[in-house]
Image (cartoon, helix red, strand yellow):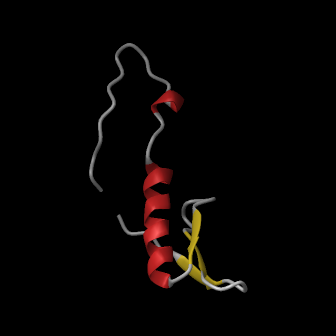
Amino acid sequence: MNLKIVFEKSEEGGYTVYVPALPGCISEGDTREEAMANIKEAIDLYLEPVEDDLPLGVETEVMEIAL
């Protein structure tokens, strides 16, 4: 899966980075490398389903796929 990310220099220093395709998926870092690592983690958490939020029926099966 490929996603576009946007880096913005912060006035306080460092970078803010967000994913336009994932509303609310935003992070920051003191360096571009740190911001990149942080947004990757934020994307993983954003896309990770929370099983408590899934409407599971009796015949429901939860699986994982790689994208």
* Nearest to the observer: residue 57 or residue 53: 53
Is 29 rendered above or below residue 12?
above
Q: Taking 67 as reference, is 49 left or right?
A: right
List the single residue furthest toward the top. Answer: 58
Q: How many marks?
A: 0
Q: Taking 25 as reference, is 41 left or right?
A: left
Q: Taking 43 as reference, is 65 left or right?
A: left
* Nearest to the observer: residue 1 or residue 17: 17
Q: Residue at x 57, y 67 (%)?
A: 27
Is 45 rendered above or below residue 50?
below
Quarter of the figure with residue 17? bottom right
Q: Residue at x 43, y 65 (%)?
A: 40
Expressed as whole percent of the image width and height from the top left, the position of residue 39 reads: 49, 67
Q: Residue at x 65, y 86 (%)?
A: 13
Quarter of the image with the N terminus in it = bottom left
Quarter of the figure with residue 37? bottom left
Q: Residue at x 38, y 13 (%)?
A: 58
Expressed as whole percent of the image width and height from the top left, the position of residue 3 reads: 44, 69
List the single residue furthest toward the right. Answer: 11
Expressed as whole percent of the image width and height from the top left, the position of residue 28 reads: 58, 72
Quarter of the image with the C terminus in it = bottom left
Is 2 rendered above or below residue 67?
below
